[in-house]
Image (cartoon, coloured by chain):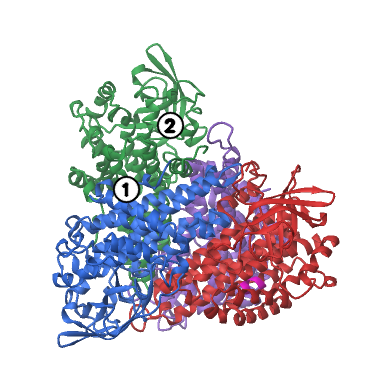
Chain colours: A blue, B red, C purple, D green
């Protein structure tokens, strides 16, 4: 019997812990997620079904410690040059069940990248936050708070807007930053996040990237308010809400790296985030393949199983071919995020542009071919029980993460064609 | 100027009554559905069911084709196709699911009560279900589809879900795990395509929702079309009188489906018009790339907005082309012909695929507002996709196209 | 039954003379072009030029709109749009390039001699060029396009290639390396869109091919449209009398272009009909997957053939929708309006993109026979792509769509 | 200035001779091909412009010796596990100028794969043919003759048709095969081929793959006739014609491998051929990128260079993103063709299916996005002088090589979904 493991992976890139992580995640997915996932949509507000598997994975298995140094109770993967390919495997396995969970899982690490990666490891902050993640078996979520009510992706569009539209302010007051502002949509908010990296400005309206600051805020600090989770077309496990900061005071050293560097290393978040999106897509497609194989083997047309009709097989082939391509590209992206010695620094605009390029291309391929196979399933394509419609709804939400397709296109064009005024 | 006037359509071919109906539907659905949607979301009891009642029974869409003597409006000329198009694009603009249900009712009315098809006995038996009282009658179909049963009798490659046995006293229907086209939970009348035991010619048999032996499963969850609370059916020896057979043979199916596809197409255009309106408002107000830059002024987002408008233009023209073909049977072969059936199926798929693409891309443009339920766009996306699925697999529809245009009779 | 009857179009809206013209064109091009193509290939002198003569001068397409008193057929009602569509799809079916040239002539005739636009002085000056003698007059346009010159005056974002200076004695035109829309080598009359020095309103000025100061470059090689031997032009102080200015301002351009786009669209549909015919023959005769299996019976190839038929159906409907819009100015805003211009541009792009897709996929189906010149298919593919390029960049056309549908006036 | 070398290549896969080969090919392309290529279309019959650069590359530089063992005067690359990635680089560099030349170049080696690769190296035949290729500085072309007048790709469709439609026969007569038949369309025919591998049957109508034979025939043998080159929509450097075999007699040991194995190892030709097609596509796209960058920098719209319009930039980004994806996938395919230790044998149906999948997907992407950028160039898109239309015409021809898209789809579906009746 052909399975999802028959699809190609670039074997030269696979991480040493791939086999172990793969089997742990596969079992967890089968036992703790698959049986419940068809009820996740209605659980978007409470997470009464969604939270328990996270508690097991992040807290009990301890995956939330992954990126912290070993001497602080972590697994030291922040220093590994297999971080991203290992993450790719984990992301895929989770996304096979639920891409919202995969995204929520990925974003746990997102705000920590600023302080956990070389050459800008911030030991003092790692020590500060390690206990929160490493000394508990409860799930602890992080969030990276960027988007603001005005302008949407504009915050992400650093090259052109240069942070001059950021409305969330950090004002120095003695040894503290005083933060005020309003963020929308961060993954793992809606009451979930314990630790937030907040993108703000130390000088509103400035075009100087040194005034863009990333400052950590804990959920239980006075002045922090998280609103309830939004209701969306899908992706219930990715909780998004408003976050308000009202005279929130944090120590000065809660700033991630420092003037200039906070903006510069933002590229790392972008590069790895876009790589993650590809993994979530290909993981999802693995499951669609499984469901499709089942469906087209059972349903009949012209006296034969549906998959035995040459015309139908043509579309099934397209689906498999797209999985192959997306996965190959996805692993290459992960590899490029890992191996700075070969492919240059993770924050390099060229690398970021390449990650963005593949992410939006993969997304387009997914929406196109998944839309088609969903329709191939006739009325059952729209059934919750066949899971394809869920993946289709969920993945569409990923298209807007880290800026729209149009923003991606502009960044790609800017780099590859050296456009100057976009 | 709203989309209804901006996007070209053959307004001059519509009768004044059509335009009046469209105008009053527009007012009704805006007030009844669109204005209350933020609060009531997709609530069936609170929003969709009452709206359906207003549309079908009060405004009277379910009476449209039936003769006046049975309480209908006797609007049963071929040119009623324009009325169907104008009405369903209005309803679809507010809620695709409501338009989807209305399309079922109007297609069945057309198949039974259109001048050319008119059979007194048939109409006399069925019209009262539609015209008497003031309650909406939800119509659903059971059509040949992809089945798991080996050796099931087929229509154009797809299996019949229900088998009928004829006899002196009428018909006996059996089928397990039957998937209706809509509203398995609520439908008051099912039109069931049946393989007839011992005969080659299939039958289309009308089964009242309360027929003994007809059992409805639990409502299942699906992507969209909340107005259609669907469930699988079991038919265990359901008895139907002989007159319950609406027709035998292909021509009747072609008729019914051609009108049905017109309805779905118009509903799709309605969703597109709504999409355009939402996007237009967004484009006028959203700021990107820093202060003072309006969304619609950016050449990249404007280009995509332009393409979206083009899709709406094309799809609306095609929907009215289909209405025109039905309206002029002499020129296009008439609604029982394979030619017209093929065209209708082609145009329905064309418009559905375009609508999927268009709304998908509009969501892309509106970013998170595109998928937040609050902004009302994502619902059209889910609804269109669901309607497309219920329209049937495009890969297999292409075989229908080939059957007519290349005479590939082995398919 | 050939594609002309099989694919739906509003035959009942065409006059008998339209249908007769289409029928006689069909016969002519089959004999004159299609039957001789295998031997003469794309030979200009041997095949294309004589055919153009027959179509334009003998059959008389270049006389169609002009008043009878000047030797024309005075077929100058808006409904002549149907004649244009019916004629050009026939010609395009045989050779897209010939249809492309005819589209230029017919569009200019419509812009100048259509009832509503009629200006006696103008027509008196121009009609004889078309109606006198028995030689074909090749019409070409010079339109705003992408230019390299910095600071060139623009029309909707594109640069004027030619600048005109007005004066008491007439106009003086200058432009270097000007790219005409067709036939730079052969055209007898150029319609030139000019920026006017010191004024905002552009002018459309008619320049005879033999005007002193008009110099033609060498013919260059291009993908397709062999009937249009194109070359760049230099205009060095070309003098044109005052009456040579056909119009000022946007409405005239909208008129001309709307009819022009109709012509291109119909030519594209012609190519699609030919594609269908070639594929259908292939499908009936080609064996695949071993002995006894005919191509059209395979579910995968049949599905793609079916999809190709759908594209032809949709595109033909759209072409006639556009003809219908031009035919009924009261209903659609008329041929000088931005609304109709936008629709025409949308539909032309829609049909061209579909034709590209369709022929591309047909080639895929016919494998090496698809790209061998011998099989005659690949020529349509090259021709359509070339015509699409000359239609202009779709990415920029989308801005035109946005200008009308979202009022993005900053673009 | 951004150049084609800024696009991603998986650096871990690059062959040791990549730098050297790359610079030789790049210089040859610039000097010997680029200046003439705009006149190649009219040269399809004579090859008076096309032949000289081939003479230099194949004969003088000696590239035609590449696959032969070193002790026979070759370069020994038939035994290298970098053969395909090295070929990928060479293919891309040539295709940048002319994909027809790249294909003609690739097909030189095609008929030799049967005898040059492990585990079925045929020493006696290598010795027999080595002088023809290695002891001359004239260009020598090979051809693989498959397609027949009936049924087109049916010959390639071995799994379903099992060779039972092959009409070209090889009848044993003493120590010789007597070959009769008619082939169409092989690359490098039309009078060019010196050595042909002819696919024939030893038992007409048989369903037994052991009856499929690959037998070598030299052009100068009695009974071999090559017709003139066909006229096609493009790809003038790929000369195709009819070949007739009339009682052609060759020694029995001219059969490539032997009963069963000739059919089995056909998969190698398919796998590498499909990989090659991807390289030809991505090489072509490199040049389109260059031309497009030039065009959109020079032409103006709304007062700015065309590439500075955000809407245009969006499409330019799509083009760059597709290059990235196709190239990443293409190199992965080449790597999979090289590293049998990791990815399994080169003739494995799964590997062949995966190569077919990526080839048709890349082709679809190319036709779609290149069609769009061509149209972006307005009237100039159709100009010979801008080169894009040439690539567009040429690459389309590649779509039919080694069977149509539909045949590819069927093979992909058959493998990934275990279809049994396709």
Q: CA distance from mark 1 to mark 2?
A: 33 Å
Dot 2, how many residues are within 10 Å of its Cα: few (below 14), some (14-19), or many (20+)?
many
Q: Is residue C139 visible?
A: no
Q: Is residue B292 visible?
A: yes
Residue B280 location (% of width, % of height): 49, 78
Task: Report the residue marked by disc 1.
Answer: A9
- The residue closer to the viewer here, A224 or D353, is A224
For label 1, the SS is loop
Residue range corresponding to the magenta coloring: B86-91
Q: Is residue D147 magenta?
A: no
Above or below — where is C277 with respect to D176? below
Q: Nearer the viewer, residue C85 or B273?
A: B273
Element assignment for label 2: loop
Q: Is residue B189 above or below residue D47?
A: below
Q: What chain is tagged by disc 2?
A: D
What chain letter is assigned to the residue under label 1? A
Q: Are marks 1 and 2 on the same chain?
A: no
Residue D99: mark in rendering: none
Q: Position of residue A210 (x, y in %)?
A: 19, 78
**Residue B90 located within the stretch drawn in magenta:** yes
Q: Residue furthest top?
A: D174
- Residues C399 and A371: in front is A371
Rate crowding at label 1 as few (under 14), some (14 to 19) or many (20 or more) other CA atoms within 10 Å. Answer: some
Percent position of residue B297, x then y: 41, 78
Place residue D379 in its image quadrant.
bottom left
B279 lies above or below C284: below
Q: Taking D329 as reference, is B380 left or right?
A: right
Which mark identifies residue D146?
A: 2
């Amino acid at each position: 019997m052909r399975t999802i493991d028959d699809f190609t992976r670039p074997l030269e890139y696979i991480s040493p812990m791939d086999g172990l992580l793969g089997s742990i995640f596969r079992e967890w997915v089968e036992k703790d997620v698959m049986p419940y996932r068809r009820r996740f949509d209605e659980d978007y507000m409470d997470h009464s079904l969604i939270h328990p598997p996270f508690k097991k994975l992040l807290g009990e298995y301890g995956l939330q410690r992954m990126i912290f140094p070993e001497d602080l109770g972590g697994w030291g993967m922040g220093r590994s040059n297999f971080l991203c390919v290992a993450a790719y495997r984990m992301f895929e396995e989770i996304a096979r069940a639920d891409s919202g969970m995969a995204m929520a899982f990925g974003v746990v690490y997102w705000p920590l990248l600023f302080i956990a990666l070389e050459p800008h490891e911030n030991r003092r902050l790692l020590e500060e936050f390690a206990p929160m993640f490493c000394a508990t078996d409860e799930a602890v979520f992080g969030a990276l708070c960027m988007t603001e009510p005005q302008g949407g992706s504009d915050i992400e569009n650093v090259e052109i807007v240069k942070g001059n539209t950021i409305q969330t302010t950090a004002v120095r007051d003695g040894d503290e930053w005083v933060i005020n502002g309003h963020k929308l949509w961060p993954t793992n908010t809606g009451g979930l996040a314990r630790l937030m990296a907040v993108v703000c400005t130390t000088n509103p309206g400035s075009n100087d990237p040194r005034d863009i600051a990333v400052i950590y805020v804990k959920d239980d600090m006075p002045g922090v308010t998280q609103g309830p989770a939004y209701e969306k077309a899908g992706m219930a496990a990715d909780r998004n809400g408003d976050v308000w900061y009202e005279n929130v005071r944090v120590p000065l050293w809660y700033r991630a790296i420092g003037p200039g560097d906070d903006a510069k290393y933002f590229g790392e978040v972008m590069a790895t985030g876009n790589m993650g999106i590809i993994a979530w897509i290909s993981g999802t497609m693995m499951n669609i393949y499984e469901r499709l194989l089942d469906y087209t083997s059972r349903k009949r047309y012209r006296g034969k199983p549906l998959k035995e009709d040459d015309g139908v097989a043509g579309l099934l082939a397209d689906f498999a071919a797209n999985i192959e391509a997306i996965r190959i590209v996805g692993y290459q992206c992960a590899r490029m995020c890992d191996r700075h010695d070969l492919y240059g620094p993770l924050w390099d605009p060229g690398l970021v542009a390449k990650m963005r390029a593949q992410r939006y291309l993969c997304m387009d391929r997914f929406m196109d071919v998944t839309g088609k196979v969903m329709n191939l399933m006739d009325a059952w394509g729209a059934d919750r029980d066949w899971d394809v419609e869920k993946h289709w709804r969920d993945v569409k939400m990923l298209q807007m993460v880290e800026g729209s397709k149009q923003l991606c296109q502009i960044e790609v064009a800017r780099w590859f064609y050296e456009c100057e005024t976009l | 100027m709203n989309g209804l006037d901006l996007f070209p359509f053959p307004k001059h071919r519509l009768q004044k009554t059509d335009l009046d109906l469209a105008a009053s539907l527009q007012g009704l659905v805006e007030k009844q559905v669109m204005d209350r949607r933020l609060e009531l979301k997709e609530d069936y009891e609170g929003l969709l069911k009452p709206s359906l009642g207003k549309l079908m029974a009060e405004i009277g869409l379910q009476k449209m084709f039936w003769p006046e003597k049975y309480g209908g409006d006797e609007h049963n000329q071929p040119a009623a196709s324009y009325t169907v198009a104008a009405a369903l694009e209005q309803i679809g603009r507010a809620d695709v699911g409501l338009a989807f249900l209305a399309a079922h009712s109007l297609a069945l009315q057309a198949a039974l009560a259109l001048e050319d098809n008119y059979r007194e006995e048939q109409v006399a038996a069925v019209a009262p279900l539609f015209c008497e009282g003031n309650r909406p009658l939800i119509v659903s179909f059971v059509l040949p589809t992809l089945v798991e049963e080996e050796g099931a009798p087929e229509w154009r490659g797809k299996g019949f879900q229900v088998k009928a046995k004829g006899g002196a006293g009428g018909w006996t229907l059996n089928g397990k795990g039957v998937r209706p086209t809509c509203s398995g939970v609520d439908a008051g009348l099912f039109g069931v395509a049946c393989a007839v035991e011992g005969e080659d010619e299939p039958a289309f048999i009308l089964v009242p929702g309360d027929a003994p032996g007809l059992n409805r499963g639990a409502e299942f969850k699906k992507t969209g079309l909340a107005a259609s609370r669907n469930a699988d059916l079991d038919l265990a020896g359901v008895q139907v009188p002989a007159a319950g057979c609406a027709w035998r043979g292909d021509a009747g199916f072609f008729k019914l489906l051609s009108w049905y596809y017109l309805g779905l197409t118009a509903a799709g255009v309605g969703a597109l018009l709504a999409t355009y309106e939402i996007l237009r408002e967004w484009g006028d107000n959203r700021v990107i790339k820093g202060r003072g830059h309006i969304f619609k002024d950016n050449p990249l987002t404007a280009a995509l907005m332009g393409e979206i408008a083009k899709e709406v233009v094309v799809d609306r023209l095609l929907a009215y082309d289909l209405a025109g073909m039905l309206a002029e049977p002499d020129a296009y072969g008439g609604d029982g012909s394979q030619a017209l059936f093929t065209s209708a199926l082609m145009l329905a798929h064309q418009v559905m695929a375009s609508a999927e693409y268009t709304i998908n891309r509009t969501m892309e443009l509106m970013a998170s507002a595109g998928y937040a339920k609050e902004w009302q766009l994502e619902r059209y996306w889910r609804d269109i996709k669901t309607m497309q699925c219920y329209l049937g697999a495009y890969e297999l529809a292409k075989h229908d196209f080939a059957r007519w245009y290349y005479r590939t009779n082995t398919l």
